Image: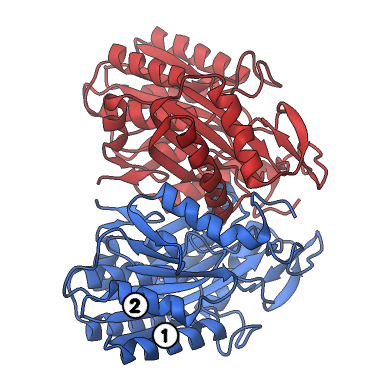
Chain colours: A blue, B red
Amino acid sequence: MKKLINSPADVLADALRGIQAAHPDVRVDTENRVILRGEPTRAGKVALVSGGGSGHEPMHGGFVGRGMLDAACAGEVFTSPTPDQMLAADQAVDSGAGVLHIVKNYTGDVLNFEMAAELAQGEGIRVETVVVADDVAVQDSTWTAGRRGTGTTVILEKIVGALAEEGADLDAVLALAEKVSGNGRSMGVALTSCTVPSAGKPTFELPDDEMEVGVGIHGEPGRERRPLATAKEIASMLVDPILADMDATGPTIVLLSGLGGTPLIELYVMWAEIAPLLETAGVSVERVLVGDYITSLDMAGCSLTIVKADEEMLRLWDAPVVTPGLRWGA
Amino acid sequence: MKKLINSPADVLADALRGIQAAHPDVRVDTENRVILRGEPTRAGKVALVSGGGSGHEPMHGGFVGRGMLDAACAGEVFTSPTPDQMLAADQAVDSGAGVLHIVKNYTGDVLNFEMAAELAQGEGIRVETVVVADDVAVQDSTWTAGRRGTGTTVILEKIVGALAEEGADLDAVLALAEKVSGNGRSMGVALTSCTVPSAGKPTFELPDDEMEVGVGIHGEPGRERRPLATAKEIASMLVDPILADMDATGPTIVLLSGLGGTPLIELYVMWAEIAPLLETAGVSVERVLVGDYITSLDMAGCSLTIVKADEEMLRLWDAPVVTPGLRWGA
């Protein structure tokens, strides 16, 4: 295992120290392993809390800041954060207007966020929850009942974060979150496995001439192993299952994310093949992000996310955002 | 070789198509392989032209836009662009106020930018040149007489781009560029080789338990092979040679860049170790970027760049920038 780390046991604590040192605009609660905005939540603003296992950076800690999340709970690598962490986050950011939990659909995350919501409600904090389950690859998976949650989370956190920043109430914030979640679909492909530091060896074996189509963000099995293919062929393997699962005609917001071990030049090559496929299918890409936004440690590969968007969602997408991982308009 | 590409011969052309499709704010001249701003240069504004071999994305094409570069010439992977490309760039962006060539110190780039400058001057365009040679690892290298040019280039393009945007003349822009270049030092480390698509195999062999300290951005040999070490030990191997080569006390701008195959979580672990070393040494880190800014295809590792900065440089660093790879303040 070749990694820039001190020891497998220290990866999360060390990374949190690094995040704090690199980003003075956020405040890291190292005891609870929660990343918070530097400023307390404005009175009357609904707070957005997300989180999950680490290893997907910049998600979620990199999306804490004005116009996006109020707090992100960081679990150990590929491990759900605990209800205690989530409760600490809720308590830190609730201004009285309530909290939205944004949860990717993995069993541990879902159960722990549920328990945290109950604890928070017991303390008088109103909590609502949106669960993202956008990965079309498989119906159930290693750690998931139902579809896995992936790239739509990033787009949801941006759009819904902008609505909360404008002062919308929790009902409106929840309604939009459910809409964005319902409008998004994702599909990924891995050329290599990732290596979890505490395991010290690749999560799965993949021969030199094969790839995993439909891989999960923790290396969960996808739809099938296939021989290595060209970018053009892979583009179809990502686009086709997504379009088979949604009506994506009309305006969309699209994310092409690297998985951590793939350089940007390859993502541009992929986007050169995906963009014309979408155009031919009548999908209008109004906004697109190409880069590392939801990663899987050092896995080589990429994931494609398409979210159908109306004018309101596009307006909120364009609203100012100031976070370590996403920044524009301010 | 596992890459998201169509064929080794098409990587650059495909990536340029992808850049154009992803970033409507830039205009890709596919014939000349030049990435330009969407709008013509404002009359009286000095134009900044950079470029080099591809494979270092987002550098340089990702730094084209308001407040930074006017044009970037993209060579084949790890290969200098040609004088013809550079001349086309100069002609496209000169508004009459002249052009600054920003060149990393590799023999091919230096010679070709020199030839392009002569050609452009023959057509009445005033051209000045700054050569960045900031890598402290080795005195001469595989493709370089003198020190190699690396991460200081990113910081220079931002700071000098802001000055040009304000309307400074070519003499002032050149003077600041030389100052920033002289103020910057870099040092890198590789845990793995990269693989150039046309070669199809790793550029160099590196055993599973070794790393290359002082590696160049094309995989050129560094100072020494050493056994794999902890993040804390590696931090000293990067910081010490830089500080031995400059007086870095006082304010600085720092870049910790991934090399393309290293995930962000590891860069944060590294930054957690580097930041306190700098503090102890009396280096005041006023601004820092942690992420992939100057990469080496799929190489695992990182590079550290420290640029001594005065108040004017910090002010220009903070000025608005709107490019695919760096964006704030607008």
Label 2 residue SS = helix
Question: Image check: B132 left or right of A179?
Answer: right
Give me the residue at 19% from left, 77% from top: A168
For marks 2 and 1 on the same chain, the one whose residue lies earlier in the sequence: 2
> Type of residue at label 2?
Asp
Is B2 drawn above or below residue B123 in the view shown? below
User: Would residue A314 be seen by someone viewing this image from the given angle?
Assistant: yes
Name the spot of residue A263 as percent of width and height, x first.
Answer: 59, 49
Query: The numbered mark 2 sits on a residue in which chain?
Result: A
Q: From mark 2 to mark 1, how far is it between C-alphas?
A: 9 Å
> Type of residue at label 1?
Ala
Question: Image check: B6 left or right of B158?
Answer: right
According to the picture, the residue beneath numbered tag 2 turns out to be A90
Give me the residue at 37% from left, 32% from top: B158
According to the picture, the residue beneath numbered tag 1 turns out to be A116
Please identify the quarter of the rendering in which residue A251 is found.
Answer: bottom left
Question: Image check: A177 left or right of A52?
Answer: left
Give me the residue at 24% from left, 86% from top: A171
